[in-house]
Image (cartoon, grey):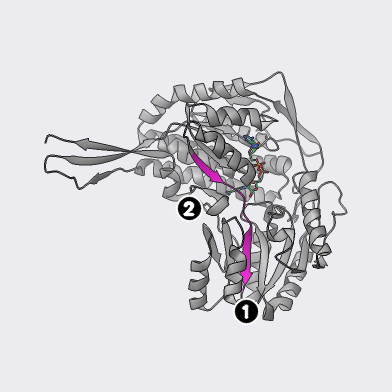
Amino acid sequence: MPLLPDLLIPKAYIDGQWRDAPRHFAVTDPATGDVLAEVPDLGGDDARDAIAAAEAAWPAWRKRPAKERSALLRAWFDAIMAHQEELARLMTLEQGKPLAESRGEVAYGAAFVEFYAEEAKRMAGDTLPSHGADKRILVFREPVGVVAAITPWNFPLAMITRKCAPALAAGCPVVIKPAEATPLTALALARLAEQAGLPAGVLNVITAERPAEIGEVLTTDPRVRKVSFTGSTPVGKRLLAQCAGTVKKAAMELGGNAPFIVFDDADLDAAVEGAIASKFRNSGQTCVCTNRLLVQANVYDAFIEKLAKRVAELKVGNGLEDSVVQGPLINAAAVDKVQSHIRDALDKGARLVCGGEPHALGGTFFQPTVLADVTPEMRVARDETFGPLAPVFRFDTEEQAIAMANATEFGLAAYFYARDYRRIWRVMEGLEYGMVAINEGLLSTELAPFGGVKESGLGREGSHHGLEDFTELKYVCVGGL
Ligand code: NAD
């Protein structure tokens, strides 16, 4: 078993104190099944304590000059990057992704802290033309208040910083509820925030094995003014409904069903590389992962042949080992879902090109899989697989491709490969998605607004839009001048 890194702290973090609890739950390594740590299983009262600490910290935090908030965020960024290697190892241990991807996630996640350290100084308001000679209109941007951040296991670090950095920059304290599978990276981030000098109560982390009790408190307590959630669409809908009672602001980064369209004028080799990056990264467990490959009929066979060749080269194994590019899936339920999608497609006439079975390594390792002759009647067309399965659909015309791509209740990310610039414009404008990548398989960056339309969510994270989501506008009318 590999040595555990220094930043492993099996305690929750509330009001600047490391808190234990009578009950604990195990965090395991999905590659080996080994227990990495037992962390506190907190309940509703602990959540209320964290909210109280955040509420108490808010007045001083919001009044702190932007330049000071910025300097503290910058110190947090420096601390994260100084511990990139330990954080990456910890993430691979609890989540399973290959070490190179974990290092990439630390850098990506830290980039939000760096970016919003800068943006904190640019939270400008407006002066607007007024409706009377004796009046003036001023518009201030104010922090929304206490923020609850509920995050998923697939990006244990970046989903936290993508919410917390803009919240803290805007002057909001945060209560973080990380996923039960990956709380250790969240707690390590809190340790680094503490070392960077963030005041007590400004950033809190509460861990729990059964999230519903804490979720109920975070979404109904009137002191929480915004819930920022990343996770599945069913849970997001439930939390959104719970937020209605106190009319909280809610940001929802939910599931996807990303199409990846390959037109007959595309550079096929570049499209294959894009598809590999977008489909098999994190073993297919990202919300922007390609879920459906749509390929034009006259390049269909050639594309499948090239794709299958590249997929066969993907090395599966423990993410801590060099040259592994696909780690285990997060748990047995994830494996069941991939298998059920494959079975359903094969039963309805799909053709297995490669993979299709649990990997010989056992546990939750799964073979990277390609299915051909997939049709819209199959489950993979509608449901997010969240695993290493590339189902390839066939289309004839551009209109058909756009219609197939949009035939889903989701609208997070879409990808397409083409060369004709008129087609590129037409297709880009026809896709009902929050994010579109053209001749590119990776699109996440702190510099751009990340988020979806339709049932993929509400709000945007990243860029200056991500900061604005943590503010309210206050209109001030000055009269009698
Ligand atoms: P999930 O919805 O099961 O869990 C997400 C978080 O919600 C976890 O912290 C979990 O403990 C918590 N949770 C679950 N039930 C809750 C409840 N009743 N009250 C309060 N909290 C509750 O999702 P997951 O399996 O962790 O993540 C995978 C999903 O997340 C996929 O659908 C994926 O597409 C989506 N995702 C979306 C984005 C995005 O930016 N749009 C990014 C990453 C993941």
Q: Hey, what amino acid is under mark 1?
A: Asp
Q: Hey, what amino acid is under mark 2?
A: Pro
Magenta-colored span: 250-262
Q: Are marks 1 and 2 in contact (CB under 8 Å)?
A: no
Residue 318 appears in the figure: no
Task: Give the residue at x 62% y 67%.
Answer: 404
Q: Which of 190/256 is in front? A: 256
Quarter of the image containing the N terminus?
A: top right
- Categorize mark 2 by other alpha carbons within 10 Å: few (<14), some (14-19), many (20+): some
What is the quadrant of residue 474 in the picture? Answer: top left
Residue 96, percent across and down?
73, 46
Q: Which of 467/414 is in front? A: 414
Residue 468, percent across and down?
41, 44
Question: Which quadrant of the render holds ligand 1?
Answer: top right
* Residue with the mark numbered 2: 449
Q: Which of 46/27 is in front? A: 46
Total of numbered circles in the picture? Answer: 2
Residue 76, percent across and down?
51, 36
Question: Which one is earlier in the sequence, the residue at label 1 or at label 2?
Answer: 1
The residues tagged by marks 1 and 2 sit, at their Cα atoms, a distance apart of 30 Å
Which element type, helix, strand or loop, lies under badge 1? loop
In the rendered image, the residue lying farthest to the top is 22
- Categorize mark 1 by other alpha carbons within 10 Å: few (<14), some (14-19), many (20+): many
By secondary structure, the bulk of the magenta-drawn segment is best described as strand
Residue 254 lies in the magenta-colored region? yes
Residue 395 appears in the figure: yes
Image side of residue 419 versus residue 59, left or right = right
Residue 392 lies in the magenta-colored region? no
State whether residue 178 is above or below residue 254. above
* Residue with the mark numbered 1: 264
